[in-house]
Amino acid sequence: MAFPHRPDAPELPDFSMLKRLARDQLIYLLEQLPGKKDLFIEADLMSPLDRIASVSILKVDVQPPSHASLARFSFDEQYKLLKSDYHCRQHEVDKLYKVENKPVLSSSEQLCFLVRPRIKNMRYIANLVNADKLAGRTRKYKVIFSPQKFYACEMVLEEEGIYGDVSCDEWAFSLLPLDVDLLSMELPEFFRDYFLEGDQRWINTVAQALHLLSTLYGPFPNCYGIGRCAKMSHELWRNLEEEEDSETKGRKPEIGHIFLLDRDVDFVTALCSQVVYEGLVDDTFRIKCGSVDFGPEVTSSDKSLKVLLNAEDKVFHEIRNEHFSNVFGFLSQKARNLQAQYDRRRGMDIKQMKNFVSQELKGLKQEHRLLSLHIGACESIMKKKTKQDFQELIKTEHALLEGFSIRDSTSYIEEHIDRQVSPIESLRLMCLLSITENGLIPKDYRSLKTQYLQVRPEECIFKCVDFSKRGVGERVGEKDREKHRFVVSLIYASTGKITDAFSSLAKRSNFRAISKKLNLVCGTKDDKAPSESLRLILVVFLGGCTFSEISALRFLGREKGFRFIFLTTAVTNSARLMEAMSEVKA
Amino acid sequence: MRHDTPDATDLLPPTEMSFLVKFLELMNRTKVDEEEYWNSSKFKAFTFDDEDDELSQLKESKRAVNSLRDFVDDDDDDDLERVSWTGEPVGSISWSIKETAGNSGLNHEGREQLKSRNSFSSYAQLPKPTSTYSLSNFFRGRTRLGSFQSLSDALSDTPAKSYAPELGRPKGEFRDYSNDWSPSDTVRRLRKGKVCSLERFRSLQDKLQLLEEAVSMHDGNVITAVLIFLKRTLSKEVLFRELEVRQVALRHLIHFLKEIGDQKLLLDLFRFLDRTEELALSHYREHLSIQDPEKRKEFLKTCIGLPFSVEDSAHIQDHYTLLERQIIIEANDRHLEAAGQTEIFRKHPRKASILNMPLVTTLFYSCFYHYTEPEGTFSSPVNLKKTFKIPDKQYVLTALAARAKLRAWHDVDALFTTKNWLGYTKKRAPIGFHRVVEILHKNSAPVQILQEYVNLVEDMDTKLNLATKFKCHDVVIDTCRDLKDRQQLLAYRSKVDKGSAEEEKIDAILSSTVSRAATPPQPGETDSSQSSIKCIKGYHRVTTQFLSATVTLDLVLDMASSAVNGVTTEPKWLSPRLLEKGANVAGPPGGALTPDCTEHSKL
C-alpha cells in the first residue's frame, strides 16, 4: 500500500547530521555567554528546537541518565515544567521564557534571546533593556538570530540606543529534517515576504542552505529551475560557492539533481483541498513541524496527545500517501490482521507463549496503539468533513479545475460565503475560481467581493486588495489554467490506474518540466540505470509545498525509480496560504 | 600586517587541520584582509559628522586617549602626519603612541584581543555612532566551532576577520579612495554580514551604483541595508525619484517602512508615486486602532472622500453607514433591554453589543430582535436589506437562520411563500431547499416542518437522502412509491417502528399492486404531502408556543459562525457508489480512474 520502492531505488542520504550540527552550534553559542543565564525563545522557534534538542541538552552537557526522562517531553511541556522549579547547572540555562508581550520577571544577570530576525522582537528586547537602564540595572544581553540577522534589526537596536548593550550572534539553523526525505527551513514568512511584498531577504538564506547541503553531501551536478526566485537563489548560491571555493570540488556527488521551483508557478495545487491522508491530517489538525496534536476526540481519552508523524510511524508510513478513501479499508484490514496475530496466542503452549511475549507482543502493542490513533484521526476527519459538506466542496473544486459549469461553481461560492462556513475557505475558493478562470468577470468579482465584505468587513478589504495583486480580478495568461491540474488530479487518481493517468496528465502539467527533465535524466529507459546518485533528486520549493505535492512526487519517484528529497521553505496548505495573505495580524 | 596574520591562528582553538587550512587561506587572502582591514577601520575611526566640529572632537579624543593609553600602542610610523587632522579619538590613539614611542612587543593580534576586551569600556567615550554599521564590528565575532571546523570554514569568515575587532585602527582613514572597496565588493561584504562602510558613497552616482550592485546581488537584506543608508543620506524627493525607476528596490523600501512602522514616510512615498489607492487604504487601515465607536465613525467619515476606486469607496461608505446605524440601534436596544418591557429582550438577553459587527451579523441581529418592525425604522431587516443592497440569497439565509433559531415557523413559512398574480401561492427559495432543510434541522425543527421542506427538494436522490437522514418517514415512503423502488421500500420497513402508522402505510403500498401501477404523481406535489402540510400548520403553531419558552439561545457572539452551518450527515462521500462518481469527476476525461476493486480487496 505504501509506496514500495523499486529494488534499485537509491538510498537516501543521512540527514540527521544536520540536526547534530545545529544542536552543537547552538550549544556553542550559549557557551559564549558563560555563567547562569535565562533564555528567551521565540514561540516560532520552539517546535523546530524541539526537533533537534531537548531542554536538558541546553542545560546539561551530555544527557545524564537522571535527565533522560525529561527528553520525552516536548519543548512546550518542558517549558512549563522548568518554569516551575526545575533547575540545572551545566549549560547554565537557568530558566526558559517565551518571547511574548508580557513584562519579564527574570532575576538573572544574563539574558539570552533566541529569535527570528524580526522588527517586533527587536522592539521587545529594546523595551526590556531600556527598562533595565531606567531602573539602574546592568545585565548582559545576548541576541541570537536564527537563521541570520538582518541589517534592519541592527538598525532598530541602534535607534533604540541599545546597540552596544546587547551582543548579537547568528545561529545558522536553516535546515530541519522533518522526515527521511523532507527538509524544512521552517520559514513560513518566506511566502509572504517574497511573493507578496517583493522582499528578497530570504534568498540568501536559501542560498546558504543549499551551500551547506552541497558542502555536506557533495556538489549537485545538474540544476534546473522554474521561476524568478529560483533563478535568483541559484545565482546567489553559485556566487557563494565560487567565493568560498570549498572542498566540495573533488567530492563525489551524492545527490544528482536539484530542481528549484517557485510557489507562484502553481498556486492551484496548493489551493485545492487535500485528499491524501497526510494532507488531510494537515488540513484538519495542522501538522506543526512534523508533529500533530491529536485532541481528545481522536485519542478517545480525556487528554490530547502530541504525535510525531514520520516514516518511523509504521502505520502512518503506509497510509500517508494514500487517497483518504483507501485509508479506511487499509486500517480495518490492518486491525483484522492484528487481531489475528493476537489470537494466535490461544493455541500456544508455554514455550511458544514465552516467545510470543518476549518477541512479538511489544511490537503488536505498539502497532495497536498507532492503529487506534490513526483510526481515531480518520473518524474525526470524517466527522468534520461531512459537517462541512466536503462532498459538494470537492465537486466544486473539480468543476473549477476542469473548467465546466462555472455558473454553478460561482453560485456555490456565493452560498459558501453567505452561509458563513469559514471565511478563509470562502476566500480560498474565490482565489481558485479566479486563477482557474484566468481572472473573474468584473460583475462576479464585484458581487463576490461585496458579499464577502458583508460577512467580514474592514479587515477584509485588505485581503481583497492583496488578492487583486494575486489573482482575484486579475487576468492571467491563457495557458495557465491547463498548467495546474497535474498534482491534484494525480492525487485524486491514486486509487486507479495511476500510470495511465500520469502519462496523460504529465503532458499538460506544470510539472511537465520535471517529468521532461526526468526523461532526460532517465535517458533511454530500458538501458542500464544511471548510477545511484543520479537518481536522487532534490526538489526545492521556494514559498512552501503541500503534503499532496510531496505525495505526488514520492509516487512519481516510485514509478520511475527515483528518490526525491524535498527541501521546502515551509510545509504549507491552502489555509496557511490564505492566512499569509491576510493582513489582520500585522 | 602580513607578518601578523599567522599569529592569529594561534589564538584559535587548536583543531587538527584547521590551522593548516586557515594558514593557507590566510596566505591567499592576506591582501584581501589587509584591504578589508584598512577599510573598516577607516570607517570606524572616522565619521564625517565629526569634521564639523574638529576642535571639540579633538578634546574628546584626547580624553579617550588618556583612558586608553595603558593598552594601546602601535608601530605604524605613517600615522604621524595624519594625527594633526584626525578629529576623532581612535585616530589620536596612534598619535599618542607616537608620543610615547612605546612598543610593547605585543603582536597585533594580541593587542587586538586586548582592545576587544576593552572595547566595551571605551565604547562610552566614542562619539555617537553615525551609522548602523559603524559599531557592529564589536559584535561581529562569528561563531567558531571547534567541533566542526571544516564546516564552519565553509560557512563563515576567515578567522582573522572574525575576531579582530579593529577598533582603534585609524590608519586607513584617509587613504586615497582608490584603495577602497568598489561597490560590488562592498555589497559582497554586506552579504556576508560583515561590517562595511557606506559613508564613502557620497555622490548620488556612487549611491545609485551601490544600490544597483545590491539589487543585482539579489539579497534582500543587503538591498535593505543600502536603502537604510540612502534614506538617511538622501532627501526623500531624490530618494523617491530614483526609486521610482527601480522597482525591486522600491518594493524593499515599502516593505521596510511598513515593518518599522514609518507611516509618515510611507504615505509620502505613496503620494509621490501617485498610488492614490494604496495611500487611501493605508489611511483607512488606521481606523482599526480606534476603539471608541463615535471616534471611529468620525474617522470613517474622513475616509469617504479618499481616492478609492469607485466600488471600494462604496464599501467605505457602507462601512460608515453601518457603524452609524449600529450606534443608533445599540443605544436604543440597550435602553429597551434595561427597561425590561420588551418580551424578546427578556427571553433572549443580548450576549454582546452589535457595534463593529459585520453587516450579516447585524442583519441576523435585526431579524432576531426587530423582525416585524416597519420598513421605516433603522433597525428593520427590510430597511437594512434596501440600504445595503443585500442580495436575496444572503437575506433569506440569514433571516431563515434567525427565525428558525426563534422557532418562528410561520415566519419561515412566509419567507418562502410567494403569491403569483392569480393569487396562487407557491414555495420558492433563492437557495436550494436542501439548504433550508439543513438549517431547519440544525435548529431542531419538528419532523412535520422538515417534511414539508424535504418534499420541496427537486432532486429525487437528494430528497431521499435527506428524508432518510432526518427520518421523514412519509417522504421516504412516498418517494419510494413514486420511484417504484420496491426493494428500498422493503429495506426501509425495518427502520420504522413496529406497528406504527408508517409500517402500515408501507405494507399497504407493498400489498397494493394498484398503487405501484398507478401513474406516479409529480414529485413534491403528492396528495399525501399536501395534506401533511395542512396538519403541520396547525401543529406547529402549538409547538412554537410550547417550545419557545424552553429554548435557550446562545446568541450574538456565535451568530456569525453558527447562523448557517452544515448538518451532520452520513459519511456519504465515502460510500462506494459515490466514490465511483467522485472518481469519474476527479480523474481525467475518459473515466480511466474508477477505483480498482480488486486492488482494494487485496489489501
Image: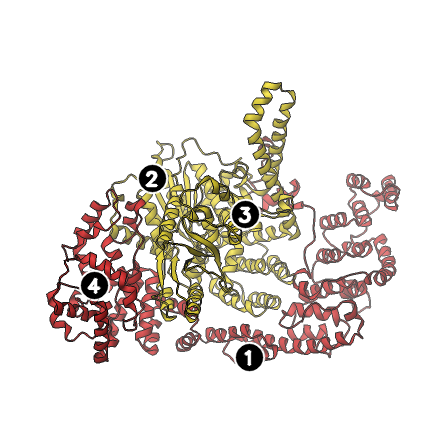
Chain colours: A yellow, B red
Compare residues A444 and B251 and report the one nearer the observer. Answer: B251
Q: According to the image, label 3 marks what residue?
A: A292
Position above or below: B216 against B14: below
Secondary structure under tag 4 reads: helix
Label tally: 4
Name the residue rendered at 33%, 73% in the picture. Answer: B231
Residue A569: image x %, image y %? 43, 52
How much space separates mark 1 and mark 4, taking CA atoms?
62 Å
- Kind of residue indicated by mark 3: Val
* Mark in front: 1 vs 4: 4
Chain ID at mark 3: A
Q: Around disc 4, counting alpha carbons within 10 Å, would you say few (fewer than 14), some (14 to 19), or many (20 or more)?
A: few
Q: Are marks 4 and 2 in contact (CB under 8 Å)?
A: no
Badge 3 and badge 1 in a common chain: no
Name the residue rendered at 20%, 75% in the picture. Answer: B87
How much space separates mark 3 and mark 2, taking CA atoms?
32 Å
Q: Are marks 3 and 1 in contact (CB under 8 Å)?
A: no
Q: According to the image, label 4 marks what residue?
A: B71
- Kind of residue indicated by mark 1: Phe
Badge 4 and badge 2 in a common chain: no
Residue A199: image x %, image y %? 39, 63
User: Residue A348, located in which quarter of the rendered image?
Assistant: top right
The tag on residue A254 is 2
Chain ID at mark 4: B
Q: According to the image, label 1 marks what residue?
A: B299
How much space separates mark 3 and mark 4, taking CA atoms?
58 Å
Label 3 or label 2, whichever comes before in sequence order: 2
